[in-house]
Image: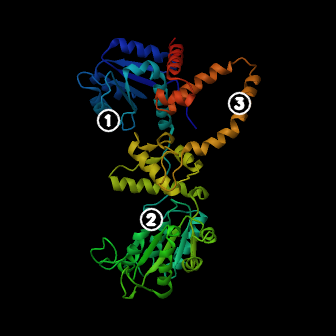
């Protein structure tokens, strides 16, 4: 839920040009914010420390020190401070350095007549949300962070119980579930809790290796077995003798290789490609797939006898949307791991961010959640993650990619008529005094600029109008707000 910018918010504008300060003050006076102006960067820092403004807008070329130096000093004093850097010349280096130092945004002065109010409103709203956000108390203890598989839902507790039961046996295990659920983590857990834990665990993706190379990858080959086989190769079955072999995407394994794998499971022996010697290897097989193997069997794409040899024990991993109670735990786990790996301070989740994550369907499952948080950590400008920091739908796992539009579009198509009906009913209850079209046009225009990061090309495309029309509309709206 967005928090409206309170009337008591303060904006500090620092620029060497007094004409620009007068113009900016005029633009923002109708917004209900207190505006403080200053021409000196040294005085501006003193004002910041004294007034604690909600937003600072600073020009690049200030004296006695530049805007970037002021930005660095402000962020050192207050790590969550909202600072926008402006410049008449937005060079690549200036933009990169500003964002590296933690600027909320970088704006060229020529764009300010069109975007000043929108950007300021967005920044002030973010400042209000950050001030109102209360970091959620971590749900995991330090000890729980050490586990690779995190989950307290009933579904995941059942998975853990199965892992415990099968770990001490040598029975083949088939792990099923959607892409990005963490099937390899289950395989690693089975191995680490088994008596084979001191031996190797090797993983191979059957879908990532061409058919003519997969057999050699698994079973090895003799010198001269085929063109390019200049030396003998030891396959994965020999390499992890006494250990565990994880066959990911087993449903994509070619039928010819399936036959040889079946013999290994039945007899515990095989021959290298191009060789005659029989080799025995004591390997525990854990396979995984996101395919329905029973359907693949019906289509003659997977051997039925191999399926039953692999599926001695079956473990199904539920999708993340089916275990909402695990989302927060996983998020905290990933944030802790990212902080340790990147030697960064541990970011905290706001209650609002948790609610947003728990309401999102996560089509890319746990992998999408991990990638989303990695991006959020990289781009975050405060030590508390807010909903605005989570690019939901824009980051997904390779096998679970999803565009937010593909998720939202069907919902929008069903509810546009209902939304329009609700608008008209609400206006009629108010006596019909509000003019609907100008109101909708203004709100949609401002929101389009907000969600596209003030990119006029994208905003005009989103609204279905030309860029020239959008510019005229923004001039009219900004002009009206500045009167």
Residues at marks 1 and 3, CA–CA distance in whole angstroms: 43 Å
Which residue corresponds to mark 3?
420
Question: Residue 95's x, y, as percent?
Answer: 33, 32
Q: Kindly give the residue lying farthest to the front in the view shown.
A: 227
Give the residue number, with chain letter if any, for mark 2.
148
Mark 3 or mark 2: which comes first in sequence? Answer: 2
Which residue is pictured at 47% across the width and 37% down the height? 130
Query: Residue 282, position in %: x, y?
Result: 42, 85
Q: Secondary structure at mark 2?
A: loop
Q: CA distance from mark 3 to mark 2?
A: 48 Å
Front-most of residues 44 and 59:
59
Give whichever of 422, 237 is nearer the camera.
Answer: 237
Q: Estimate how packed mark 3 is, as few (under 14), some (14 to 19) or many (20 or more) residues with alpha carbons within 10 Å.
A: few
Q: In the rendered image, which quarter contains the N terminus? A: top right
Q: On screen, 208 above or below 362? A: below
Q: Is residue 446 left or right of residue 283?
A: right
Observer-side mark, 3 or 2, equals 3
Q: Residues within 10 Å of mark 1 (few under 14, many from 20)?
A: few
- In the rendered image, residue 462, in percent from the top left (x then y), is placed at 55, 31
Question: Which quadrant would residue 14 be assigned to in this image?
Answer: top left
Instruction: Name the residue beneath numbered marker 1.
Output: 96
């Amino acid at each position: 839920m967005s928090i409206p910018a309170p009337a008591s918010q303060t904006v500090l504008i620092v620029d060497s040009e007094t004409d620009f300060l007068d113009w900016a003050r005029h633009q923002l006076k109708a917004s209900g914010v207190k505006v403080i102006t200053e021409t000196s960067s040294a005085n501006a820092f003193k004002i910041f420390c004294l007034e604690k403004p909600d937003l600072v807008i600073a020009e690049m070329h200030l004296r006695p020190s530049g805007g970037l130096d002021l930005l660095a000093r402000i962020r050192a004093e207050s790590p969550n401070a909202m600072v926008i850097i402006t410049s008449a010349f937005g060079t690549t280096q200036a933009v990169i350095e500003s964002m590296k130092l933690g600027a909320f945004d970088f704006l060229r002065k020529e764009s300010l007549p069109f975007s000043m109010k929108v950007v300021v409103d967005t920044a002030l709203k973010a400042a209000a949300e950050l001030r109102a956000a209360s970091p959620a108390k971590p749900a995991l203890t330090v000890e729980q962070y050490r586990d690779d598989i995190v989950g307290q839902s009933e579904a995941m507790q059942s998975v853990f119980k199965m892992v415990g039961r099968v770990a001490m046996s040598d029975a083949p295990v088939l792990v099923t579930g959607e892409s990005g659920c963490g099937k390899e983590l289950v395989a690693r857990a089975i191995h680490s809790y088994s008596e084979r834990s001191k031996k190797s665990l090797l993983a191979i993706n059957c879908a990532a290796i061409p058919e003519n190379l997969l057999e050699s990858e698994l079973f090895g080959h003799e010198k001269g077995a085929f063109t390019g086989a200049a030396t003998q190769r030891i396959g994965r079955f020999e390499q992890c003798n006494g250990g565990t072999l994880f066959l990911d995407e087993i449903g994509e394994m070619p039928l010819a290789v399936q036959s040889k794998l079946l013999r290994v499971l039945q007899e515990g022996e095989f021959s290298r490609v191009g060789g005659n010697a029989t080799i025995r290897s004591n390997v525990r097989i854990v396979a995984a797939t996101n395919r329905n193997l029973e359907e693949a069997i019906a289509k003659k794409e997977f051997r039925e006898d191999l399926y039953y040899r692999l599926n001695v024990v079956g473990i199904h991993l539920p999708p993340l949307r089916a275990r909402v109670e695990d989302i927060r735990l996983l998020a905290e786990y990933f944030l802790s791991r990212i902080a340790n790996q990147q030697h960064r301070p541990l970011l905290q989740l706001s209650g609002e961010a948790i609610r947003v994550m728990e309401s999102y369907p996560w089509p890319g499952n746990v992998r999408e959640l991990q990638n989303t948080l990695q991006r959020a950590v990289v781009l975050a400008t405060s030590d508390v993650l807010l909903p605005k920091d989570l690019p939901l739908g824009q980051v997904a796992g390779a096998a679970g990619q999803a565009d937010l539009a593909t998720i939202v579009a069907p919902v929008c198509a069903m509810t546009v008529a209902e939304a329009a009906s609700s608008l008209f009913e609400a206006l009629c209850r108010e006596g019909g005094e509000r003019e609907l079209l100008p109101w909708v046009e203004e709100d949609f225009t401002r929101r389009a600029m907000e969600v596209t990061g003030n990119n006029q090309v994208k905003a005009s495309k989103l609204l279905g109008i030309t860029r020239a029309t959008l510019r005229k509309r923004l001039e009219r709206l900004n002009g009206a707000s500045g009167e």
